[in-house]
Amino acid sequence: MSEPVISHGGAPAPASRPLLAPLAPLRLPLFAAPMFLVSGPDLVVAACRAGIVGAFPTPNARPIEVLDDWMRRITEGLARARDEQGADTVGPWCANLVTHRSNERLPEDLQRVAKYQPPVVVTALGGPRPAIDVVHGYGGQVFADVINLTLAKKAVEAGADGLACICSGAGGHTGMLNPFAFVSAVREFFSGPVVVGGGISDGWGLAGALAAGADYVYMGTRFIATTESLARPEYKQMLVDCTVDDLIVSAGLTGTPASWLKPSLRANGLDPDHLPAAPERNYNSNTAIAAKKWMDVWAAGQGVGAVRAVWPVGRVVDEIEREFRAAQARFAAWRPSTAAARPVPEVAT
Ligand SMILES: Cc1cc2nc3c(=O)[nH]c(=O)nc-3n(C[C@H](O)[C@H](O)[C@H](O)COP(=O)(O)O)c2cc1C
């Protein structure tokens, strides 16, 4: 029996929702978040082998034939992993679709999604609606990537099964909301699965996010400097060398606020203090305009300090699990001082 979940306020308490069941089996409630030009089949399979959710954005696979090849490799790689280490130790995989109207390749991506059936699809830069029928058709779940309450409500109304709430401190395109405030506000009207991301790079933050009401955490930055990622060695090393003070948020590169590593801007002749005005947004997977920018200028989130070396994904997940267990123990050990202890009054719902 799962413990009833205490309501955050106005919404009915989602008492009967079994925590984390939909995406089980999972060793940790964690996604290796999808990252443009960083996440490929090796990172996805390594993350799933490590017992978490492995995700990649479909625009990384260009042209469309490459997407077919990647999805086949992931499907075969996970079948092998299930044989070798036992099915209940392998996490599910996730495809991230760009549903912005400028993405002309979306219909072809959806065909490949229908063919290979990733258990989870996360839509980004547009609403979830275009993906819902296809993904529900094979029993998968659609999560919508959202950065504010208006978008979160719209996504739920459009039929999203879950929300990926992207908050301030995220690498790449970032949100502006504080994760605790955002999750609490979402829990006022939504009791389905919630992922939270943005500046969370270790097991301590993972535990904090779950305590605050999220079901899963998205970690992107933490997985860039892994052996299996597609990032260039210089990018991985820059993450090891940089701290949270080396970041700047600007819409000047892609038209959407994103968090960049200042040294990579300087290396490309850009002054972090005088970045250009936001250009028009274009997320067409059939063009390479965006790819050119992201190839040379590198993104990272506020959890960059947790990246201490370039490690295989499995080792990173081991470390996050150790931190997570330590955080759970720390939380369980907290007691009020005797004088301060008092009965907690019942709250009317
Ligand atoms: C280099 C980079 C590329 C990203 N590309 C994408 C993307 O293509 N699609 C997407 O939905 N999110 C993308 N993100 C955002 C991540 O999925 C995730 O929301 C974010 O990394 C979480 O914050 P964190 O980096 O602080 O962990 C990207 C993030 C980074 C760092």
Image (cartoon, helix red, strand yellow):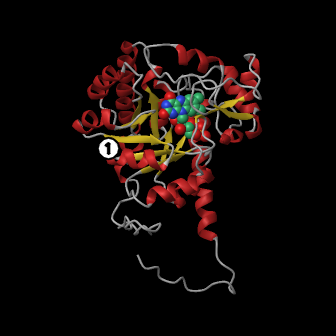
Q: Is residue 138 left or right of residue 150?
A: left
Element type at mark 1: loop
**Foreground of the two, 256 or 91:** 256
Image coords of residue 251 (percent x, y): 62, 30
As displayed, is residue 34 above or below residue 283? below
Farthest residue in the left direction?
137
Q: Residues within 10 Å of mark 1 (few under 14, many from 20)?
A: some
Image coords of residue 325 (percent x, y): 58, 56
Q: If the image is split into quadrants, where does the N terminus sit?
A: bottom left
The residue positioned 47% from the left and 82% from the top of the image is 346
Image coords of residue 139 (percent x, y): 25, 40
**In this figure, which residue is indicated by the disc labeled 1?**
158
Q: Is residue 178 visible?
A: yes
Residue 315: quadrant of the picture: top right
Q: Is residue 208 left or right of residue 87?
A: right
**Foreground of the two, 52 or 274:** 274
Q: If the image is split into quadrants, where does the C terminus sit?
A: bottom left
Q: Is residue 275 left or right of residue 313?
A: right
As displayed, is residue 15 above or below residue 70? below
Image coords of residue 265 (percent x, y): 72, 23
Q: Is residue 25 visible?
A: no
**Foreground of the two, 81 or 17:** 17
As displayed, is residue 173 above or below residue 345? above
The residue positioned 62% from the left and 47% from the top of the image is 202
Residue 336: quadrant of the picture: bottom right
